[in-house]
Image: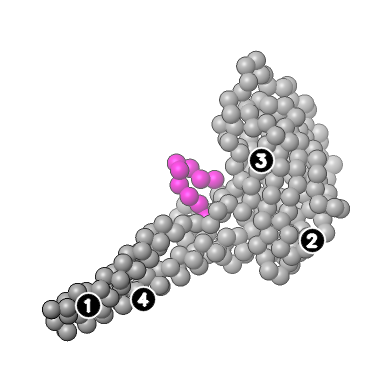
């Protein structure tokens, strides 16, 4: 009389564990942003705004030595000044943004610095494409801008802006100075073609720019497959006993 309940119990436990891990596998997604930006006054047309950036260290063998940033439309390189940075790091304006860097930080140390922007543009959000270079030459590219609510593997730091304050007006731009020397060559910051999304994820894993999310998803999938096989075994075993 008690054979059926006893046989069903282990099968129910196996199915419950299988269902829980399937749910975990479905909810697993890309890793969170590893380069972020915050503002002292995140409002459109705000003046003399301090932008604070943090780039998380992701290499186990070297520290961050340089950050290259492409400024969003509406912010000219000559309207940006360095406010604070790691010791002995220098700020250099480029044709489309700036670089800040120097002696490589200790391995595992996040790179934090801040700049002052003369005025933020009249936009809803600003993306600051960032390239991290490590002391051993490795490069991480946080240059993808999510659109339509979609998630991306290597998101650029994005600053959401509030509407402009009443009466706020754009400041007349100052003449751009003629560069005295050509900027040093830097890795391309153009996002990968839409047809190469899989290749983008692979590249991110190779250069340490966020491959952890993909590895986690693969691991979860493997566990789900094992437990699925276990659940089927329990069901067949119970039926054979009955």
Looking at the image, which residue is at 64% across and 47% down? 36
Residue 38 bears which disc, if any? 3
The mark nearer the N terminus, 2 or 3, is 3
Q: CA distance from mark 1 to mark 3?
A: 58 Å
Q: Quadrant of residue 172?
A: top right
Residue 199 bears which disc, if any? none
Q: CA distance from mark 2 to mark 3?
A: 24 Å
Q: In this rendering, which labeled residue sits more in front, label 2 or label 1?
A: 1
The residue that mark 2 highlights is: 104
Q: Quadrant of residue 109?
A: bottom right
The mark nearer the N terminus, 2 or 1, is 1
Looking at the image, which residue is at 55% across and 64% down? 212
The mark nearer the N terminus, 1 or 4, is 1
Q: CA distance from mark 2 to mark 1?
A: 63 Å
The residue that mark 1 highlights is: 6
Query: Dividing the image into 4 quarters, which one contains the C terminus?
Result: bottom left
Looking at the image, which residue is at 57% across and 60% down? 210
- Asked if disc 4 and disc 3 are in contact, CB closer than 8 Å, the reply is no
- Asked if disc 1 and disc 4 are in contact, CB closer than 8 Å, the reply is no
Secondary structure of residue under mark 2 = loop
Does the image show residue 239?
no
**As displayed, is residue 180 above or below residue 117?**
below
- Give the main secondary structure of the magenta stretch: loop
Looking at the image, which residue is at 45% across and 41% down? 148
Q: CA distance from mark 1 to mark 4?
A: 23 Å
As drawn, is 130 to the left or to the right of 8? right
The magenta stretch spans which residues? 145-153
Does the image show residue 5?
yes
Secondary structure of residue under mark 4 = helix
Residues packed near mark 1 inside 10 Å, few (<14), some (14 to 19) or many (20 plus) = few
């Amino acid at each position: 009389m008690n054979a059926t309940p006893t046989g069903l119990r282990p099968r129910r436990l196996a199915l419950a564990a299988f269902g829980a891990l399937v749910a975990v596998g479905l909810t697993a997604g890309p890793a969170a942003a590893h380069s972020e930006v915050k503002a002292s006054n995140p409002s459109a047309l705000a003046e003399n705004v301090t932008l604070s950036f943090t780039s998380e260290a992701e290499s186990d063998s070297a520290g961050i030595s340089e950050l290259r940033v492409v400024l969003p439309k509406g912010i000219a390189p000559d309207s940006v000044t360095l406010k604070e940075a790691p010791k002995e790091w220098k700020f250099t304006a480029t044709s489309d943004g700036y670089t800040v860097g120097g002696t490589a930080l200790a391995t595992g140390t996040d790179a934090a610095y801040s700049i002052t922007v003369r005025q933020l543009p009249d936009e809803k959000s600003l993306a600051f494409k960032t390239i991290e270079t490590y002391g051993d030459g490795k490069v991480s590219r946080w240059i993808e801008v999510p659109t339509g609510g979609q998630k991306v593997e290597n998101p650029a730091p994005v600053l959401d802006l509030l509407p402009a304050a009443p009466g706020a007006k754009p400041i007349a731009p100052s003449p751009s100075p003629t560069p005295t020397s050509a900027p040093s060559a830097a890795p391309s910051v153009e996002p990968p073609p839409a047809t190469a999304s899989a290749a983008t994820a692979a590249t991110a894993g190779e250069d340490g720019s966020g491959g952890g999310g993909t590895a986690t998803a693969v691991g979860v999938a493997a566990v789900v497959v094992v437990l699925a096989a276990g659940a089927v075994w329990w069901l067949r075993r119970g039926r054979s006993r009955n």
